[in-house]
């Protein structure tokens, strides 16, 4: 039913839900196809005038966010603490703390807010959480396998048994410079900040998302960890060039590793400025205060 | 958490009492001087000289003539008390003490504060008879139960106790290091038994512990000599045949008893596992237990006592698991004395049984002593599990850590917890933590929880908490955001809630048995098992 909706909505673009299967096509032809498409890039995520409040308190956080991410594009959102970056990220994946009060968000042409969080994941939308929750008593490898299989099942692919999954996850673990011992620990339990971020990216790698929202994957990382994590993200991106990325960060150093096509500045629940890396340099020099005058 | 609580009160008949006596509201410290008692030093420790039958004549009245104020006690004693002449001398002496205490005792009712939420009257309606014992139990059923238990090969010893009596044939005690004793009273080191058997239960045991002392036919004794580290666990499998020795229609009573003494610097791991010969789901097995039907009036009662004496620097890891059948009532007393710098670590998992009650009493008798308690109780259809724990710290630099977790998965299930940690005036620099987490999965599921940290010392570090909730919203969402369906996510979290404790059991086969029992209990809640 989902994929039907998806096909119908996407039909005008001429590229159907079979895009995921196409990914497995011959590499050479595929790369060319991507290059061609990178220029026009189909719209992956289209957010229009999105407004949301905290359900429990009624406090309005998002006050009209508009943003479009096309396939293959990398976007960065910067902004002061409390400007609503994490709220935007979580609203997009359906976090129950928030209530959408206006505007729209379409992913692959489908109204996101009509979908359960797990359905959004099945369609390839992924959020790397700023503060991932710890789940005592659930082993990381069981969790990763169940999640991977849920996505594979939704895509009509064969589910992996524990042994197959082990083989599937090991190279991804290596790419992230993660100790295999992490697989047997409980999900995020007792992980350091950096280990949690690596674990988020490991999930991104397992789930082979089409649109990755990365909320402060650089905070709390030392320089080695930052390099590992960025390298892994870039690795995933090169395997799957039309993956869209929306990253939230405070720091230029992340953007030196993962180069954004667009940089947005968020302030009080709105995107007030959009530019390119030049905007980041300007920001480094004069801080957010300069921008507020131009807002 | 407040919101979770508020939200839950709407749908669950929830009773929560949390009480924290701050140091400003000083409670007079208990004045019982006996608490300063140190473990007695005994000569020739480790020399497992068999106990010569003691000359002391215990003038125990023939059981049939026992008079007691409580009519149920009187009737029961008449039926279940063994002839003292048939008992090893220390047990005969214990029996006579218990009988005289029982003469004026009353079985608890819900009017007793200690049993306010735990109604034992259904148990007390049954006419009790002694259990059949290993000789009468069908060999095939016993062997099947043993095979199902798949005892860990690495165990230092396995002891099979059927209806309170050691089944020598099915136990395996071969590989124990010299000086270690594991076995019945008859061959146990006499000095150990005479100073310790019944010492704690007499002082701190309740009515069910007295009943055990009156009805026990033997005691399993574990003695670890000084500075010996036993590798591998001592795994005690208590099986209930559920069959009364005499007439049908009577409930069988089993009274297994354990005494474990760890000398200075000794360390060991003891697993107590309680199971039925009938499978835990209550369906009658092919052999032997057809008479003990699930809904029959009979059922059976196990009243077990375990006494642990840890001398200075001794370390004990203790696992206590109940997987008994749906017709089982189970009352357990665990009593622990801890010497200086000793450590006691309990992992408790209760899944089986219709009504189970654990009275746990730990006393720290020296400095820098560690006590750890982890409990997981799963209350399904018609099940009540009750933990009453008392931990007393009287000396400086003690550590206490208690985690209590309870799931109630049925409207007819109930969990009861009363956990008292008392940090007395002299127990300065104590580090005490107590946390009770309760998960009510359905409307009208009930817990009555009273974690209770009393602090009289002023230089201490104590934390204390209690939550009653549904599944954690944030964890559920995290799993769903990874594409895991709401149903599967709920299942994963329910299992994981218990697993935090269950995985401390360290014995994978035992963990698997526990998880299988959990799946049966939770099947009605989660639908298909995971
Ligand atoms: N679940 C919530 N409950 C209450 N307030 C919230 C919640 N989530 C976000 N907020 C508030 O919304 C504002 C924006 O927060 P957030 O989106 O986390 O900002 P950022 O990620 O840009 O630092 C802050 O004032 C924050 O306190
Ligand atoms: Mg944030």
Image (cartoon, rainbow, N blue to C red):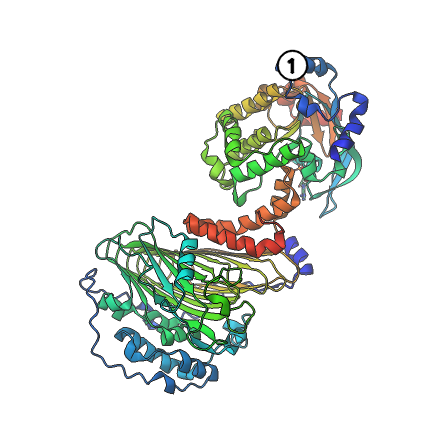
Q: Indicate left or right for A73 with A130 as reference.
A: right
List x then y, in percent, for residue B368.
34, 55
**Residue at the image point whose x is 74% and y is 46% from the top:** A58
- Left or right of residue A278, residue B323 in this image: left
> Which residue lies under the disc numbered 1?
A31
- Residue drawn where x is 65% and y is 61% of the image: B12
Where B504 falls versus A61 (above or below)? below
The extreme right residue here reads A12
Observer-nearest residue: A122 or A271?
Answer: A122
Label 1 beta carbon within 8 A of ligand 2: no
The residue closer to the viewer here, A201 or A124, is A124
Residue B503 appears left or right of B383: left
Position of B503 relative to B18 (above/below): above
Secondary structure at numbered mark 1: helix
Residue A193 visible in the displayed image: yes
For disc 1, the neighbor class at 10 Å (few under 14, some 14 to 19, many from 20) is: some
Q: Chain of mark 1?
A: A
Foreground residue among B465 and A73:
A73
Q: Position of residue B324 (x, y in %)?
A: 48, 62
Residue B438 visible in rendering? no
Residue at 56% of width from left, 36% of height from top?
Answer: A145
Residue A273 image position (x, y, % from top left)? 73, 24
A124 shown above or below B151: above
């Amino acid at each position: 039913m989902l994929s039907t909706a998806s096909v119908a909505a996407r039909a005008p673009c001429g590229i159907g839900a079979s895009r995921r299967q196409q990914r497995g096509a011959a590499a050479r032809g595929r790369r060319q196809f991507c290059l061609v498409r990178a220029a026009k890039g189909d719209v992956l995520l289209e957010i229009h005038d999105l407004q949301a409040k905290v359900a429990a308190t009624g406090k309005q956080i998002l006050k009209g966010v508009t943003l479009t991410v096309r396939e293959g594009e990398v976007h960065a959102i910067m902004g002061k603490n409390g400007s609503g970056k994490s709220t935007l990220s979580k609203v997009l994946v359906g976090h129950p703390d928030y209530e959408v009060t206006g505007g729209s968000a379409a992913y692959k042409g489908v109204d996101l807010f009509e979908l359960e969080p797990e359905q959004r994941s099945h369609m390839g939308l992924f959020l790397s959480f700023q503060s991932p929750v710890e789940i005592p008593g659930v082993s990381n490898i069981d969790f990763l396998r169940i999640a991977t299989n849920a996505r594979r099942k939704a895509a009509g692919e064969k589910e992996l048994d524990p042994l197959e999954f082990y083989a599937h996850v090991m190279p991804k673990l290596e790419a992230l410079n993660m100790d295999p011992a992490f697989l047997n620990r409980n999900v995020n339990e007792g992980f350091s900040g950096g280990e949690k971020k690596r674990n988020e990216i490991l999930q991104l790698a397992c789930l082979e998302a089409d649109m990755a929202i990365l909320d402060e994957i650089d905070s709390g990382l030392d320089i080695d960890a930052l390099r590992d994590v960025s390298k892994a993200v870039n690795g995933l991106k090169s395997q799957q060039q039309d993956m869209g990325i929306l990253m939230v960060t405070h720091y230029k150093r992340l953007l030196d590793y993962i180069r954004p096509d667009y940089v947005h500045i968020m302030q009080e629940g709105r995107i007030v400025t959009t530019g390119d890396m030049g905007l980041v340099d300007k920001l480094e020099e004069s801080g957010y205060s300069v921008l507020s005058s131009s807002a | 958490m407040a919101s979770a609580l508020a939200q839950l009160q709407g749908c669950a008949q929830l009773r929560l009492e949390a009480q924290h006596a701050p140091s400003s509201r000083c409670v007079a410290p208990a004045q019982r001087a006996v608490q300063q008692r140190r473990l007695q030093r005994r000569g020739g420790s480790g020399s497992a000289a068999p106990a010569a039958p003691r000359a002391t004549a215990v003038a125990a009245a023939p059981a049939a003539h026992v008079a007691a104020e409580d009519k149920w006690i009187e009737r029961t004693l008449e039926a279940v008390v063994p002839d003292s002449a048939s008992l090893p001398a220390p047990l005969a002496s214990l029996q006579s003490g218990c009988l005289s205490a029982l003469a004026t005792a009353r079985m608890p009712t819900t009017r007793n504060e200690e049993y306010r939420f735990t109604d034992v009257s259904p148990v007390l309606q049954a006419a009790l008879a002694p259990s059949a014992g290993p000789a009468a139990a069908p060999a095939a059923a016993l062997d099947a139960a043993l095979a199902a238990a798949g005892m860990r090969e690495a165990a230092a010893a396995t002891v099979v106790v059927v209806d309170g009596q050691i089944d020598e044939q099915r136990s395996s005690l071969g590989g124990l290091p010299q000086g270690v004793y594991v076995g019945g009273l008859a061959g146990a080191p006499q000095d150990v038994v005479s100073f310790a058997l019944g010492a704690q239960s007499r002082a701190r045991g309740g009515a069910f512990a007295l009943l055990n002392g009156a009805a026990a036919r033997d005691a399993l004794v574990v003695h670890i000599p000084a500075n010996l580290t036993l590798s591998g666990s001592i795994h005690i499998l208590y099986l209930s045949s559920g069959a009364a020795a005499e007439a049908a229609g009577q409930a069988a009573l089993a009274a297994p008893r354990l005494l474990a003494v760890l000398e200075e610097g000794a360390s060991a791991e003891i697993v107590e596992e309680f199971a039925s010969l009938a499978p835990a789901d209550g369906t009658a097995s092919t052999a032997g237990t057809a008479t003990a039907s699930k809904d029959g009036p009979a059922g059976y009662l196990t009243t077990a006592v375990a006494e642990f004496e840890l001398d200075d620097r001794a370390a004990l890891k203790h696992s206590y698991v109940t997987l008994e059948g749906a017709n089982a009532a189970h009352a357990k007393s665990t009593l622990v004395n801890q010497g200086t710098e000793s450590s006691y670590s309990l992992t408790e998992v209760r899944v089986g049984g219709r009504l189970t009650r654990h009275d746990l009493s730990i006393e720290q008798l020296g400095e820098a002593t560690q006590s750890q308690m982890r409990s997981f109780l799963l209350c399904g259809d018609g099940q009540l599990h009750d933990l009453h724990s008392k931990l007393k710290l009287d000396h400086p630099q003690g550590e206490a850590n208690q985690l209590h977790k309870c799931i109630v998965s049925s409207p007819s299930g109930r969990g009861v917890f009363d956990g008292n940690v008392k940090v007395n005036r002299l127990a300065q620099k104590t580090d005490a933590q107590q946390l009770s987490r309760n998960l009510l999965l359905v409307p009208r599921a009930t817990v009555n929880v009273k974690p209770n940290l009393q602090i009289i010392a002023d230089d201490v570090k104590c934390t204390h908490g209690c939550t009653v909730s549904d599944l954690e919203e944030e964890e559920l969402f995290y799993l769903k955001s990874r594409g895991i369906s709401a149903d599967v996510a709920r299942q994963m979290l329910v299992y994981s809630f218990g697993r935090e404790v269950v995985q401390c059991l360290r014995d994978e086969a035992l963990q698997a048995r526990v998880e299988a029992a959990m799946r049966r209990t939770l099947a009605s809640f989660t639908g298909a098992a995971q």
